[in-house]
Amino acid sequence: MRNSEKFELFSKEEKLTNFYSDNTDILFHMQKMELSRIISLKEDDFSEKDEYAHAPEDWEDARDNYQRVLEIVGDIAGNFVAPRAEEVDRQGAKLEDGDVYYAQGTKEALDRLTKSDLMGFTLPRYYGGINMPKTVYSIAIELISRADASLMNLFGLQEIADTIQKFGSEQQKADYLPRFSSGEVTGAMALTEPDAGSDLQSVMLRADQGDDGHWYLNGVKRFITNGCGDVLLVLARSEAGSTGGRGLSLFLYERDENMQIRRIEDKLGIHGSPTCELQFNNAPATLVGRRKMGLIRYTLSLMNGARLGVAAQAIGIAEAAFREADNYSRQRQQFKTSIRSFSAVFEMLTSMRVEIEASRTLLYETSRVVDIAEGLEEKMENYPDKKEELKEDAKRYSKYASLLTPALKIHATEMANQVCYDALQVHGGPGFTRDFSIERLYRDARITNIYEGTTQLQVAAAIGGVITGVLFDRLNEYEEAYDFQPVQDIFSRAQEFRNSLESAVAHVKEKNDPAYQEFHAGRIVDIALDTTISYLMCIDALHSDRKKKIAEMFVSKAKYRVEEKLNYILSDDYLMINEHDSVLEDF
């Protein structure tokens, strides 16, 4: 089939589409989502309404602002970014004579986002930003990612500016934040090294303090997303002779001739996003915050924000893949009927839709929790007299954020990979060709459960909050806040999942065997995810008959997943733990 005929029959995405207003699920959440506390914290009780022309006057005005911004992002994503995505993927970023050049479509998209004042998305208005909460930013990232996942890796790196705003000096903020907001500079977080991937405590790039009191960076960083950016946050070993995380500090470096880009990676996907290897040669930098806090405080904060962004990116990719598969299945005829009518196909499509909406409701809940946690911390810092009043609430939400952020990344990124796998399968043989966007989405999705911490690392980050009861505290709050009687038949299943989770946690705690707990940590977190999402989908179901059907389908399948994992945990089966070495050694 000629390309012109294929495009006529199977359009990749309808042109002239606003990716915000065409997504009824996002619109549903924006309509029913409780944002009043987030707005109050983010707007400092509307203290800026007389100082900035675009600052909201009240809660309704703020919600209207959020809608308007998302409509702008949705328009850019659907009508400007998406039509360029295929060419960006084919052209990719290039390294020539030590400089990285974005694909033409990437440059044009960044220019459009900059001119729309969207590059200081979460930064305060004082620094030229538009002061959006993380919840709105997560939606924006999803919209951009649906259009082109590689562009998200540039648009979604605004967490770097946020980190400077949270922990930088007043001079650093004044020097850099307005430039981020205006789009004059882009950023990168230079954390990983050839021998320090997930294990950032092993970072060895040196930060040496000269006789002049200034800091200089020496060493190599690898796998740095947008390492060609103008302003980098660099994790470096500031304490000579140290080996652990306490010897690391965070530094702000503005690119000059003392850093060389040695190569960009030839990657499977996200070709529009350059991933660089960097060589620092006595590169001047300034310390961010306090020495020795680089990993244990600043980088953890930076990466938690990045993980939230990757989860939103994954959902955007999955949304695009589903729409490609659904569109193809409606038009593809086999045996004189649309393949969408075959049970093997409609089961895949229905499961995709349910899981995407499950991840989305978890994304918004996690984003809200992060917004409240950060808002309370900022309020305590700005109003010391309120610290005692707010500290318990801040501590509680910080725990929730620390649990939900890695849990979200697990579910969203694993979901996106499965959705893309199934969406390509719906296309059959044509999906394996470059004639259809699904092969690009399939490739782009694969990185999401790897970078910013693999799924296995996220399990290690989330399991503590499950074992220690943090999740149960949050579930208790849902039970106290909502009347689930209208959806009791579904909610009773969710409560059964909770009982299963409690049984699994009690069992591993009673065994008091770290090896057994570690082995089953992923299964325990999976049960925790099915439980949490079931609660959230029951909350959604209170507002919509369609959401009630979605919740019914989710818990129906989750029942069998939970039972299988619980049975394995309770079995005390040590075969894999005890015998894996002999199997691998024999091989």
Image (spheres, helix red, strand yellow):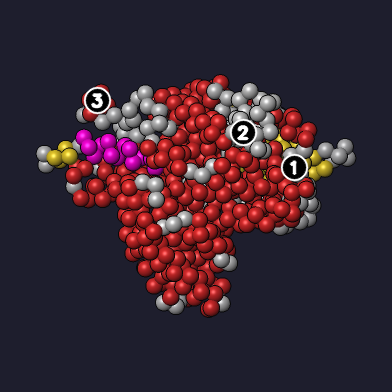
User: Looking at the image, do the residues carrying marks 3 and 1 touch, with CB atoms under 8 Å apart?
Assistant: no
- Residue placed under numbered mark 2 in the picture: 131
From which residue to which does the magenta span run? Answer: 317-331
Q: What amino acid is at disc 1?
A: Asn
- In the rendered image, the quadrant that contains the C terminus is bottom left
User: Looking at the image, do the residues carrying marks 1 and 2 touch, with CB atoms under 8 Å apart?
Assistant: no
Left or right, 534 with reference to 456: left
- Residue placed under numbered mark 3 in the picture: 8
Depth check: give the residue in front, 19 or 375.
375
Q: For residue 382, which numbered disc appears in the image?
A: 1
Discs 3/2, front: 2
- Of the two numbered discs 3 and 2 on the same chain, state the one appearing first in sequence: 3
- In the rendered image, the quadrant that contains the N terminus is top left
The outermost residue toward the right is 211
The outermost residue toward the left is 336
Residue 536 percent coordinates (x, y): 44, 53
User: Looking at the image, do the residues carrying marks 3 and 2 touch, with CB atoms under 8 Å apart?
Assistant: no
**At 36% across and 56% down in the image, what residue appears?**
487
In which quarter of the view is residue 52 placed?
Answer: top right
